[in-house]
Amino acid sequence: MILSITRVFNGARWIAEHLSSVLSICDHALVLDNHSTDDTVDICNATPHVTEQGQTDRKSTRLNSSHL
């Protein structure tokens, strides 16, 4: 499996294009959202083969393989 990992904050204006691009070469995309206040999370959740992992604090979020 080829996995793309992207960290994002308020990237609604470009995240759909980014995900389309990475999913053309990757099997799955993991998006680490850093408390976005725009539609970034909704766009990620509506895109197949994408897991959105919200950040609960400023520390790194551990990747849980059950999300993939």
Image: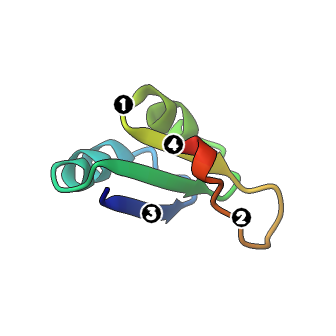
> In the rendered structure, which amino acid carries the disc numbered 2?
Thr
Q: Which residue is mark 3?
A: 5
Q: Which residue is mark 1?
A: 48
Instruction: Point out which mark residue 61 bears.
Output: 2
How far apart are the two marked residues, 4 and 2, measured between alpha carbons?
Answer: 13 Å
How far apart are the two marked residues, 4 and 3, measured between alpha carbons?
Answer: 10 Å
Image check: 66 left or right of 15?
right
Give the secondary structure at mark 4: strand
Q: Position of residue 28 (x, y in %)?
A: 36, 48
> In the rendered structure, which amino acid carries the disc numbered 3?
Ile
- Is tag 2's residue or tag 1's residue first in the polypeptide sequence? 1
Give the secondary structure at mark 1: loop
In the orientation shown, which residue stands out farthest toward the left?
A: 24
Q: Position of residue 34 (x, y in %)?
A: 66, 59
Q: Residues within 10 Å of mark 3 (few under 14, many from 20)?
A: few
- Is tag 4's residue or tag 2's residue first in the polypeptide sequence? 4
How far apart are the two marked residues, 3 and 1, measured between alpha carbons?
Answer: 15 Å
Give the secondary structure at mark 3: strand
> In the rendered structure, which amino acid carries the disc numbered 4?
Thr
Question: Mark 3–mark 1 contact, CB under 8 Å?
Answer: no
Q: Evaluate whether residue 36 shows in this view.
A: no
Give the secondary structure at mark 2: loop
Q: Residues within 10 Å of mark 4 (few under 14, many from 20)?
A: some
